[in-house]
Amino acid sequence: MALLEIRELSVRFGGVVALDRVSFSVDAGEVVALIGPNGAGKTTLFNVITRVYKPSSGSVLIDGEPVSRVSPHHVVRHGLARTFQNLALFRSMSVLENVLVGDHIRTRSGWLESTIPMPGAMRAESAARKRAMEMIDFVGLGAAATRPIAALPFGTQKRVELARALVSKPRILLLDEPAGGISHEEVDAMAQLLRRIHDQLDVTMLLVEHHMAFVMGISDRVVVLDFGKKIAEGKPGEVQRNPAVIEAYLGAA
Amino acid sequence: MQGVLQQVFSGLASGGIFASLALALVLIYNAMGLVNFAQGEMAMFATFIAVTLMDRGLNYWIAFPVTLVIAFAGGVAIQRIVIRPVERAPVLTLVIVTLGLTALINGLAGFIWGYLPRAFPSPFPSRTISVLGAYVSYQDLGVIAVCGVVLLVIYLLLQRTTVGLTMRAAAHNPEASRLMGVRVSWMLALGWGLASAVGAVSGIMVAPILFLEPNMMQTVIIYAFAAAVLGGIESPVGAVVGGLIVGVTVNLAGAYVPYVGGDLELAVALAIIVAVLVLKPNGLFGRPSVRRV
């Protein structure tokens, strides 16, 4: 069964149709890329999956269960985590603190128990720290763990966001432009990091990306959106040769 | 020199009171992006609850924590009942709501307890003690100690516990926090509860000096505004430092600058607000607001 299934999904903002009956699915273990020109509806789709927007019709299923029945703060318990195009880190906090927020569903006792320092809660807290540090080491930022986010370069911040998303042990990770806004060398390092996350942590991925070499190198399958409609789907090589895709990107000849 | 030192100590005592109320303002500012104009009235109301408990025969040191718990619950209730329905409304709506709350709480206190100023007990002896050659009252030292402990507890709660961490996360980026499983709405309510309890400390500490009546906090809140603005309205540490600076400055100005003593002390607070906004709008500990688009 598909881990993530998008079924006949439509989203309208007033008269604008952002998504028009889009359907596709992501199987466990796959890396699927979502591409398309600006305004094609890629980020809108992410926002529907994570319950930021409500769909006008259609549904999103995780492991066969509709996410519309899950309250937004419970989405993460269904094994879903994401990163953001423009980053959504807690800038005044340290790297470690950011990752600890990502971990908190795994530590969370009642708020009272975690307020009053009892032995059980203390142990849970130090276990959480340990998990967070492991994840920070995994993305290669062990040396920067206590530094405040605001002092780190953009490419490094993207790794922090990855660590924060991964520490909740997601089954599926949504990545909004993981290669956006970073340098050439960083793009290669990011591709390697994502491959390690996929192989070693067993995380399924759905990513939105404009960097074509990056997309073609990392994904098993590519879904192409244009003006809110799915216009193609297939292996990276096939999609690249698809005339409808070429037209959407370059305009009609 | 001893005179100056004496003024500094009593300045620190008022500073601790201003710091507590300023911290309350900052906690709510972080939770909803707005100053809670009703903070002073909430503190005054809590102080009336404290005195009522003591009238019923409760010991001061029992009535004090009980009042803080009641104030906490009241703060949470106000957020759930009054603020939550309008939390997505424009800022001006929220301003009017907190101003309405100010009038409502003030009127309610007057209705229940009347407008006659009444004495409020102080648990500290009125004697003085010699510190570094200056005469300092136990009252001032006690206020400094109580405020210090309360502020330290809040600091540890925010910085060292998971709840504090998620509260800060929720205030900072509600959307991303929600996605990480943080119950943002309840975290904001918790912020209101904490603010209400810290504010209550300032009310209980200032009441023996000012006498308790429904308008007791109306000047204190101005000093707290000055402290919060000076510290950088988003920074809890800033609020505390700001509170102490305002307390000491106002006290020294009152003692040594001609004409300032008495009524014009409030003008010093207003001067601080204006000066900070003109010279350093982000305050001592504030961050410049930058937004990635």
Image (spheres, coloured by chain):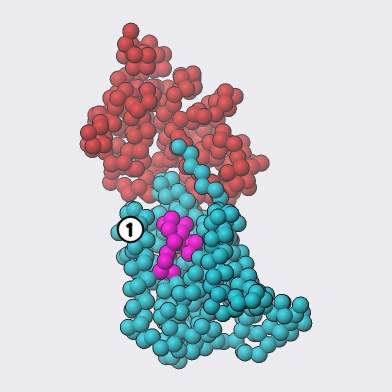
Chain colours: A red, B cyan
Q: Residue drawn 44% across and 61% down?
A: B35
* CA neighbours of label 1 inside 10 A, class few (<14), some (14 to 19), many (20+): few
Which residues lie in the magenta part?
Answer: B25-39
Q: Vertically, is B201 above or below B59?
A: above
Image coordinates of residue B38 in percent, x first then y, are 40, 69
Image location (x, y in percent) of residue B290:
51, 44
Task: Determine which residue is flagged by label 1.
Answer: B93
Question: Which image quadrant: the C terminus of chain A?
Answer: top left
Q: Chief secondary structure of the magenta span?
A: helix
- At a point 48% along the width and 62% down the height, the residue shown is B27
In the foreground, A213 or B230:
B230
Q: Nearer the viewer, residue A148 or B101?
A: B101
Q: Quadrant of the N terminus of chain A?
A: top left
Q: Secondary structure at mark 1?
A: helix
| Amino acid of disc 1 | Thr
Q: Residue at x 49, y 74 (%)?
A: B219
Residue A155 at x, y percent in the picture: 56, 33
